[in-house]
Image (spheres, helix red, strand yellow):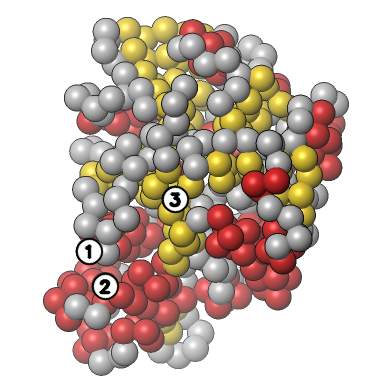
């Protein structure tokens, strides 16, 4: 499948997922904060909720899984040797022969779930955050940006994703030329083939955006809208936690930051003309670029509800096709706001069983049971890495 993502809303043709598994269960209170979690997940509940999430996507698009993709490329002994050598160098290990003697299936699981000799300390740490497949890479037009993660807990993810894109999808990849910068996929939104939105906060540095702007010259991207994000609380880690597209003319946003002026700056970079201009809000910047978006507020219009539901990824929706979205069931005030703007509420279980279909609705939001998954610190968009969408006629 070719890489082709020119918007956030085009009909989804292919997406990469990872089922949360043993690697998450290997997190302890001692390693929880280092793993970038605020709580330990109940795996039984999280997996049942995730099964509904992936079931909806399987009904509507082609789904690829990280474990399967990694197992596939490890069948090539040259690639297997290179990955094992690089991982051992990364962690200063001398266990190459032990890893190379494993079956490709076992090795794939070890690279994701971690490796320990004494059953106490992991010399290859588990991929605690891998089910948030959004962050380690980002599909930008017909290429894949391999990201530079802010924290060491996630440093191995971009490496393995690069190998998957290189050897399975045969995709063109690129990385930011400055190794000192950091950028994550939750901060990168393709608004249109000529407009990129990027969050500037604790996971994506401003210098990274400047470097990205340089590397995008010569592509169809002519404008970058940058939204500065608060450093705290942790729910503001990425732009897609406060803003996501829903349709050609609708978006979900956290009102205090996105829909009204605040102390956090909004900047429009015009790459074609070399101009940088401050804007009052993201919505104003997008309007100047001929987007006609109806903002729908995460949590509705009450400030307390907005804060509570933004904390549990109430603004973080993922688009299956224009106006057909998926998100967490627990954010009831957000769902009510969507309903007021013409989105039918549909349960994930009904989509999977065939009782309902997104094709039966002009606009709909598929709701996921969400008692446990939100404790991981992300929502539906965070748990997806789209690789191909149909082009949108604006």
Residue at 26% x, 77% y: name it. 74
Mark 1 touching mark 3, by CB under 8 A? no
Task: Determine if residue 125 is in view.
Answer: no
Dot 1 lies on which element? helix
The numbered disc on residue 73 is 2
Dot 3 lies on which element? strand
- 97 in relation to 63, above or below: below
- Residue denoted by label 1: 167
Seen in the image, is 114 located left or right of residue 239?
A: left
Residue at 70% x, 58% y: name it. 351
Instruction: Report the Cα–Cα distance between label 1 and label 3.
Output: 20 Å
Mark 2 touching mark 1, by CB under 8 A? yes
- Label whose residue precedes the other's in the sequence (2 or 1): 2
Instruction: Report the Cα–Cα distance between label 2 and label 1.
Output: 6 Å
Residue 388 position in % (x across, y down): 39, 47
Q: Nearer the viewer, residue 19 or 280?
A: 19
Residue at 57% x, 36% y: name it. 322
Q: Nearer the viewer, residue 56 or 67?
A: 56
- Residue denoted by label 3: 13
Instruction: Specify few, some or many for label 3: CA neighbours under 10 Å numbering under 14, 14-19, or 20 or more.
Output: some
- Label whose residue precedes the other's in the sequence (3 or 2): 3
């Amino acid at each position: 499948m070719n890489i082709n993502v020119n918007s956030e809303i085009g009909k989804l043709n292919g997406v990469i997922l990872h089922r949360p598994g043993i690697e998450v269960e290997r997190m302890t209170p001692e390693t929880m904060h280092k793993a970038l979690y605020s709580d330990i997940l109940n795996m039984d509940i999280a997996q049942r909720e995730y099964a509904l999430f992936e079931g909806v996507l399987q009904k509507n698009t082609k789904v690829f899984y990280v474990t399967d993709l990694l197992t596939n490329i490890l069948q090539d002994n040259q690639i297997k040797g290179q990955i094992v050598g690089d991982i051992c160098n990364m962690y200063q290990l001398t266990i190459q022969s032990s890893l190379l003697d494993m079956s490709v299936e076992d090795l794939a699981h070890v690279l994701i779930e971690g490796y320990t000799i004494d059953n106490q300390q992991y010399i290859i740490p588990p991929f605690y955050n891998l089910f948030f497949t959004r962050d380690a890479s980002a599909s930008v037009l017909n290429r894949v940006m391999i990201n530079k993660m802010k924290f060491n807990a996630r440093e191995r993810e971009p490496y393995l994703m690069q190998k998957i894109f290189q050897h399975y999808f045969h995709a063109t990849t690129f990385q930011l030329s400055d190794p000192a910068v950091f950028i994550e996929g939750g901060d990168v939104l393709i608004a249109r083939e000529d407009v990129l939105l990027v969050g500037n906060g604790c996971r994506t540095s401003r210098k990274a955006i400047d470097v990205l702007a340089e590397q995008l010259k010569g592509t169809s991207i002519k404008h970058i809208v940058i939204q500065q994000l608060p450093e705290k609380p942790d729910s503001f880690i990425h732009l897609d936690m406060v803003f996501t597209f829903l349709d050609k003319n609708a978006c979900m946003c956290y009102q205090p930051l996105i829909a009204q002026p605040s102390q956090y700056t909004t900047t429009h970079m015009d790459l074609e003309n070399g101009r940088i201009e401050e804007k009052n809000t993201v919505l104003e910047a997008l309007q100047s670029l001929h987007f006609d978006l109806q903002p729908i507020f995460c949590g509705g219009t009450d400030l307390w509800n907005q804060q509570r539901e933004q904390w549990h990824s109430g603004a973080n929706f993922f688009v299956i096709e224009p106006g057909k979205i998926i998100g967490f069931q627990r954010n009831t005030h957000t769902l009510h706001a969507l309903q007021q703007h013409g989105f039918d509420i549909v349960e994930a279980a009904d989509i999977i069983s065939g009782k309902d279909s997104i094709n039966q609705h002009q606009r709909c939001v598929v709701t996921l049971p969400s008692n446990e998954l939100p404790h991981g610190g992300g929502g539906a968009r965070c748990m997806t890495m789209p690789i191909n969408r149909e082009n949108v006629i604006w």
